[in-house]
Image (cartoon, rainbow, N blue to C red):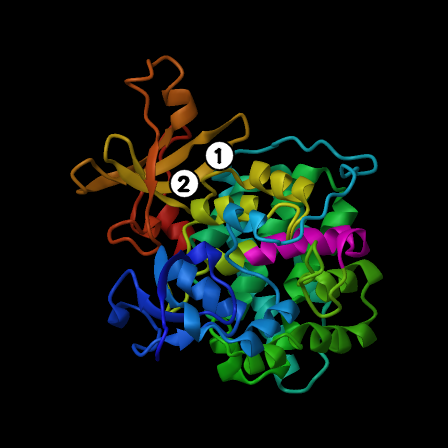
Amino acid sequence: MVGVRQNKVAVQDLEIGMFVSDLDRPWHQTPFPIQGFYIRSQSDIRALVSHCKWVMVDVAETRDSVKAESDKVVGFGRSASARGKGREELQLPPLSIREPVVYKTETTLKREVKTSRKLLDDAELALSRMFDALQAGELPDFRPVVAITQKMVESVARQPNALLWMSRTREYDDFIYRHALNTAVWALVCGRQLGLNEGLLNHLGTGCLLSQVGKTALPKDLVAREHQLSAEDYGTFRRYVELGVEALEPVGLSRAVLSVVQGHRERHNGSGFPAGIRGDRIPLLAKVAGIAEFFESLIAPRDDQEPMTPAKAVALLYDMRNIEFQVDLVEAFIQAIGVYPAGTLVELSDGQRGIVVSHSPERRLWPKVMVMQDANRQPLKSAKVIDLARFNESRSAGEALAVRDCLPHGTEGLNPAGFDVTGAESRWTLGKLISR
């Protein structure tokens, strides 16, 4: 085409309507069409963020008719640079939680992990039965989901890292189960950080577990490729929120639970769906659920897509404060999960490799790491847990251990289920707890 000019664009700065003509990696290593393509949805942008750092964009190929759809679609993948490009920021008064609860860690990670294994088994069974009934056109018994939520709340209140660790290192039979369950865990950990009482945490957790029920009414192939949808398909996909509310309203659930289901895809600046409400019109629990669901969508492994590392997802979420998510809640979420959340694969400054087990709120850059490979990338006979904060206490800056890099999901040799663990809490067999 005459007059076509190519610009190199960082993936975080892409917009709907742009024509991607080249990538920073071979096309065959991605799910994208070799002949190039228009960005038709925010799911396209999210996929590009996961695969590339930059792309080439044909300037003359940008179509205003497609770009107009961006006003109707929730945003993904926007970095701090997007803050200066007209994306509206919305500043609210500081968040105030009425009579916040100060939770204390009441048990060790080792002890609570044993409880968490059974808890996640029961949760997956409850969710699978619920979704099976919905897909069969039957009215499910939602009481098991409500009951399992209460146990999840109690576990997170006692020890916030155990359920998070187990959910991140576990294999699930179905993507929707995993998405709903992991979203609930992230949300509960954040709610605990905010000081929400256990009653509110129960509403929040139940709402997150039920937030995906509307997807049972959508075509399975559309749900399977929800991260790469055309503008037309995305219009169909986003109906899942309203379909979920319609399915749940006759059940007699609390208004607070339904508000989570209805509002978890709304966004702080009004760019969400289904109603496009903004700011204080979005219920608090729905705001927390929205952050948790968005974060899980970024880091969740899919068969045909490399997920974002949790550390990159944390950075992206921080860049979206007061744009798509309220700043107070973003900061509380990051404080709760850490800069390197549980389940993050990392390489330490001395070359050892492992997976983050938990973090210290006081030392967020020095988490506990389960080391599985030595500096030469050889597997250890038994994995060892190193508390970087404690390890570095009496060491100089030159001797300190730190996280050097985050590694992609599925990095060879870093499956925690294959290792026994040794560490400060004595020897224990994590693999038996994780494996099914």
- Left or right of 48? Residue 85 is right
Per the image, label 1 sits on a secondary structure element best described as strand
Q: Counting other residues with Cα less than 10 Å from the Cα at mark 2, is it few (<14), some (14-19), or many (20 or more)?
A: many
Q: Decide which of 118, 330 is in the foreground and name it.
A: 330
Q: Is residue 279 within the magenta segment?
A: yes
Measured as percent of width and height from the top left, residue 361 is found at: 55, 30
Q: What segment carries the magenta color?
A: 278-294
Mark 1 to mark 2: distance in Å? 8 Å
Q: Nearer the viewer, residue 55 or 420?
A: 55
The label on residue 86 is none
Q: How many badges with numbers are in the image? A: 2
Relative to the observer, which residue lies in front, 434 or 287? 287
Q: Quadrant of the N terminus?
A: bottom left
In this rendering, is residue 365 above or below 291? above
Residue 314 vertical position relative to residue 234 in the rendered view, above or below: above
**Camera-side residue: 195 or 12?**
12
- Please give the residue where the numbered disc 1 appears in the rendered image: 359
Q: In this view, does 401 lie to the left or right of 269?
A: left
Q: Residue 356 carries which label?
A: 2
Q: Please name the amino acid that badge 2 sits on.
A: Val
The dominant secondary structure in magenta is: helix
Q: Which residue is drawn at 31% across and 68% down?
A: 22
